[in-house]
Image: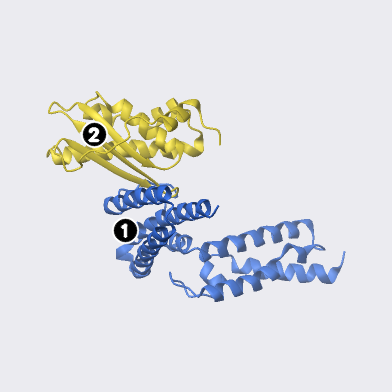
Chain colours: A yellow, B blue
Amino acid sequence: MAYSDKVLDHYENPRNVGKMDADAPDVGTGMVGAPACGDVMRLQIQVSDDGIIQDAKFKTYGCGSAIASSSLATEWMKGKTIDEAELIKNTTIAEELALPPVKIHCSVLAEDAIKAAVRDYKQKKGLI
Amino acid sequence: MCVANAVAAKASVCSMTNTEYADYFALFGLQSGFFIDDKALAATYRELAKDAHPDRFVNASAAQQREAVERAAQLNDAFQTLKSPTQRALYLLRQQAELPEETTIEDGEFLLQQMEWREQLEDLQEQADLAALAEFVRELKQARSAIDHAFAICIEDSEQRIQAERLARRMQFLDKMFYEVRQLEERLDD
């Protein structure tokens, strides 16, 4: 399948690949997987006391679209508050990357990873 | 057109229709459950496939030929589903209740393990160490076997549906791991 230029760009130059200390009190970790294709995605955020995402990292084992979706998600999350980040929708990611219908689930996985990371952070802080 | 053939074809198609494929296990004369007799499945499939082969319907009407082709495809689907342990597990779950094809799981412990395995596989690729790869495959097979045995128990207990589903999802990830391992083995063979 032909990937869009944006997917290729993120695939070839993924932003923010890495790992944070999942036990750190200011780090939220989201681990999600898509059984149908076997993709695994880890997305982490480092949040300041005023609730702003200072840094975001990801590691994804999966297809180009899954890597691009999570790479883009980390870019978009930085500088946002955790509440704003939670509002990032898979449809926006899919649109930005021009994902074909069969790859929409990759953007869904990225959205779920964002939500899982924010939830993990909120749980650590006793916010939920 | 040969009447005798047409009658035989019709009878055969009708008997196939009667099975309705409502239950794949019954279709192959197997007891429903996760662990099955693979050899019996393959043997029965070969028998049924002979009867259902579209070539047997060359003298039948166009409608009957179409039905024969469809039946043969369905029979093949049923066979492939039961042949693959993972597909068999998903089928057993679908028989009990709806199961989404695409879903996001947050099975933390297992996903962490997945990440580690993927990292290990990357290292193995760089090292091109066949002995280490064989050891890695052994570990994966052990993990798979443990999942299979746990699933076989959970699927029999409706109260353990959630756990059974989680285990079947783990099987899917392991299938992917084995696929990646095979690809690496092929690359290393070259």
Which percent across, then down, holds residue B146?
34, 67
Q: Measuring 31% from the left and 39% from the top, which residue is drawn there?
A: A113
Q: Quadrant of residue B27?
A: bottom right
User: Do marks 1 and 2 share a subunit?
Assistant: no
Quick one: B52 or A8, which is closer to the camera? A8
Give the label on residue A45, or none.
2
Give the label on residue B162, or none.
1
Visible in this render: residue A89? no
Relative to B176, residue B12 above or below: below
Q: Quadrant of residue A25?
A: top left
Residue sitting farthest toward the right: B1
Visible in this render: residue A67? yes
Is residue A73 shown left or right of residue A121?
A: right
Which percent across, then down, holds residue B149?
36, 69
Q: CA distance from mark 1 to mark 2?
A: 30 Å
Quick one: B51 or A17, which is closer to the camera? A17
Relative to B145, residue A46 above or below: above
SS state under label 1: helix
Is residue B158 shown left or right of residue B64?
A: left
Identify the chain of the residue marked 1, using the numbered disc in the image. Answer: B
Amino acid of disc 2: Ile
Which percent across, then down, holds residue B152?
38, 69
Number of the front mark, 1 or 2: 2
Q: Measuring 29% from the left and 50% from the top, which residue is drawn there?
A: B112
Q: Measuring 87% from the left and 64% from the top, which residue is drawn there?
A: B1
Identify the chain of the residue marked 2, using the numbered disc in the image. Answer: A
Is residue B8 shown left or right of residue A83?
A: right
Amino acid of disc 1: Ile
